[in-house]
Image (tube, rainbow, N blue to C red):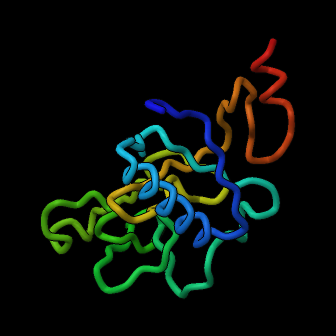
Amino acid sequence: MLYADDLVVLTETEDDLIKRLNRWKDFVENRGMRVNMNKTKLMINGERQKVMQKAVRWRCGVCGIGVGNNSIQCTSCQKWVHRRCSGIKCSMYKVMKTFICRGCMIPVTGTGRVSVDIGVNANLELVDKFCYLGDMLSADGDADAAVENRI
């Protein structure tokens, strides 16, 4: 097989999702194929939209994973952001008084996040709807987007 498309991975928790995606990515790459993580999307749907996060004291305003000492606070929303999620290339000290996170600069989904960091230098875009096998799926579970897409 030289090309694969339209794969869905379903899990109950974000940690399980990250483990399964990384295991799948390793499996595929060990067989000589390549995964385009830029085209890979993530959607949290149903009641889990708001509860699919681990309990941590301070959550990254971008990826939602707990932050440690290598982070910076957004001057707009006051959320802490990992250095790797901030996009800052220079000293964080130089920009700490004016830093605005991607969550405040880009419209976000209902979870308040725009991406999920799955490690291995990959951030998956968090979307509230996407087209799967010709049908429009939405995070809220309704069929409006699918109907509109077909009309």
In the image, taking residue 98 as reference, residue 118 lies left or right, namely right
- Front-most of residues 17 and 104: 17
Residue drawn at x 42%, y 45% as measured from the top left: 37
Percent coordinates x, y for residue 33 in the rendering: 39, 41
Query: From what the image shows, is residue 34 above or below residue 83?
Result: above
User: Is residue 74 or residue 32 the one in the foreground?
Assistant: 32
Quarter of the view holding residue 14? bottom right
User: In this rendering, is residue 103 above or below 72?
Assistant: above
Residue 130 or 132: which is nearer the viewer?
Answer: 132
From the viewer's perspective, is residue 53 above or below residue 110?
Answer: below
Left or right of residue 96: residue 82 = right
Whether 37 is drawn above or below 102: the answer is above
Which residue is at 80% across, 47% downward? Answer: 140
Q: Residue 141: percent from the left, percent from the top?
A: 83, 45
Residue found at x 46% / y 56%:
27
Q: Position of residue 69 (x, y in %)?
A: 31, 86
